[in-house]
Image (tube, rainbow, N blue to C red):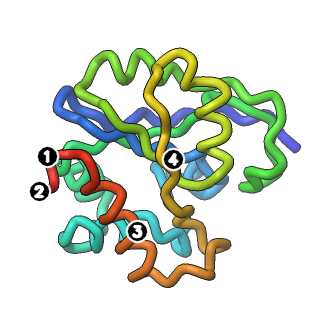
Amino acid sequence: MERVFHMIPPIISADSEILILGTMPSPKSREQTFYYAHPQNRFWPALALALDEPAPATIEAKIALMLRNHLALWDVLYSCDITGASDASIKNPVPNDIPALIAASRINRVLCTGATSARLYTRLVFPLTNIPCELIPSPSAANARMRLEDLAREYKRIIEKGTSAFL
């Protein structure tokens, strides 16, 4: 178990309406200093498919995809004790300043990628934002029960619900 700190800046603009939150960057994401960097993680292909856009290949294209669709991306935690990429091992969590991020945008919905991020957001951040989170399936390769197409379909259904940016 090691103490890790979140060093990747959020992807956000003043026009962002939906905040997507993971738990904490994986070792591969921390190494590459960008979100969902593990080659087996399906976040970027699933999100692009859900938005009817080509899968982004570069960091710049991934950022553009998020901003063009009024999405923001960050993680619930600023720091924690963790073993590898195991969300189940997290101890001593400290949240990111999500309320300040929300205040600087038009964010009115929060989506959490997986049960651990939703649980931590609800416990540590929701009391400060009063915006409940909606759970979206984890894009991790460990969530192998969902095919990429099913994951994208679920992302599309949840993202399109309640926002004008995708209609």
Characterize the local packing of mark 3: few (<14), some (14-19) or many (20 or more) Cα atoms within 10 angstroms: some
- Image check: 72 left or right of 112? left
- CA separation, marks 3 and 4? 13 Å
- Residue type (three-letter) at the residue carrying disc 2: Leu
Percent position of residue 43, x then y: 44, 64
- Image check: 158 left or right of 53? right
- CA separation, marks 4 and 1? 20 Å
- Residue that mark 2 sits on: 167
Number of numbered discs present?
4
In front of the other: label 3 or label 4? 3
Which corner quadrant of the image does residue 108 belong to? top left
Percent position of residue 14, x then y: 20, 26
Task: Choose between 79 and 31: the one closer to the eye.
Answer: 79
- CA separation, marks 1 and 2? 5 Å
- Mark with earlier residue (3, 1): 3
- CA separation, marks 2 and 3? 16 Å
- Residue type (three-letter) at the residue carrying disc 1: Ser
Task: Choose between 112 and 60: the one closer to the eye.
Answer: 112
Q: Residue at x 23, y 27 (%)?
A: 106
Disc 1 and disc 2 in contact, CB within 8 angstroms: yes
Q: Residue at x 59, y 55 (%)?
A: 114
- Residue that mark 4 sits on: 112
Q: Which mark is residue 164?
A: 1
Q: Secondary structure at mark 4?
A: strand
Res 33 seen here: no
Q: Which mark is residue 154?
A: 3
Q: Secondary structure at mark 2?
A: loop
- Mark with earlier residue (3, 4): 4
